[in-house]
Image (cartoon, rainbow, N blue to C red):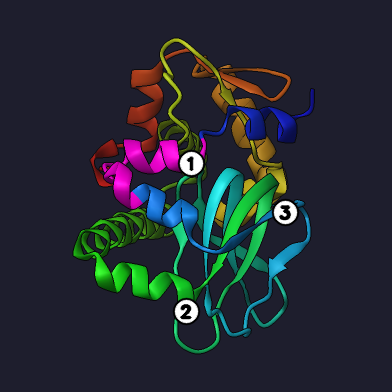
Amino acid sequence: MNRETRLMKNGAGLGETLLRAGLEPRLTKLLEDMPHKIVTVEPRRPFRERGVKRDEVMFVRSGLLSKYKTDGAGRRQIVALRFPGDGILPREGDADYGVQAIVKSEVMVGRAEDFDPIVAANPELSRFFWKLIERHTSIGYEWLVNCGRRDSTARVAHLLCETAQRAGVDATHEPLVNPFTQQQIADITGQTSVNVNRVFADLERQGLIRRQGREIHFMDWAEIQRVASFQPNYLN
């Protein structure tokens, strides 16, 4: 079974994830019953291009999506990740980022004209999405510090810690199935894939992780969090 299939099977359903995030069952059902289509998104090709009007709402049912931007030379920076249950909300005007799957993903796509009235009629939904926006903003600040101030080892270690936490992995007892290629990790942490390879080798030499195929076993969870300067409160 390949890594995309494993992650799709292990991903929680949208309704289950929204319930775990604190949304009432009634409101969860309103979102699930909204007119929509389910789209299977293949990795390694853009799902939504930047500069295109984004009058739609997207919820990740399974898999993993990324938001990305490119510089003048066409080099890509992944600026955000969306896990199962996460959404990409409608916005006015053209989007200044593209959307691409990290692994094969299932995405629920609805129209803003159907989504907006539901939110307007249910203030609890507005509060729920505002909290999610605050959470994603906090994650964005942490990524800014990660790329701007931490060294190469800490950047990769921090990404692994955050991914395990957001994926619901009990890192002291179970491995993280690594969803990323080395190039994707480089695109997230602002370095080259060659350097990412060296960092992984260094983390193994230090006895912090052990790799077995796509699985990453955390051999000393407390120590790798210290190396990464990872404090998970920003994910709450």
> Can the viewer see residue 127 in this picture?
yes
26 is within the stretch colored magenta: yes
Q: Which residues are magenta?
A: 13-27
Which amino acid type corresponds to the residue marked 2 in the rendered image?
A: Glu
Q: Left of 25 or right of it: where is 14?
A: right
Residue indicated by mark 3: 41
| Point 21% across, 61% down: residue | 127
| Point 51% across, 53% down: residue | 81
Quadrant in which the C terminus appears: top left
How crowded pointer 3 is (Cα within 10 Å; few <14, some 14-19, many 20+) is rated as many
Quadrant in which the N terminus appears: top right
Q: Left of 18 or right of it: where is 174?
A: right
Give the image location of residue 162, x and y in percent. Answer: 42, 38
Q: How far is the residue under mark 1 from the one under mark 3?
A: 23 Å
| Point 77% across, 52% down: residue | 42
Q: How far is the residue under mark 3 from the one under mark 2?
A: 23 Å
Residue indicated by mark 2: 113
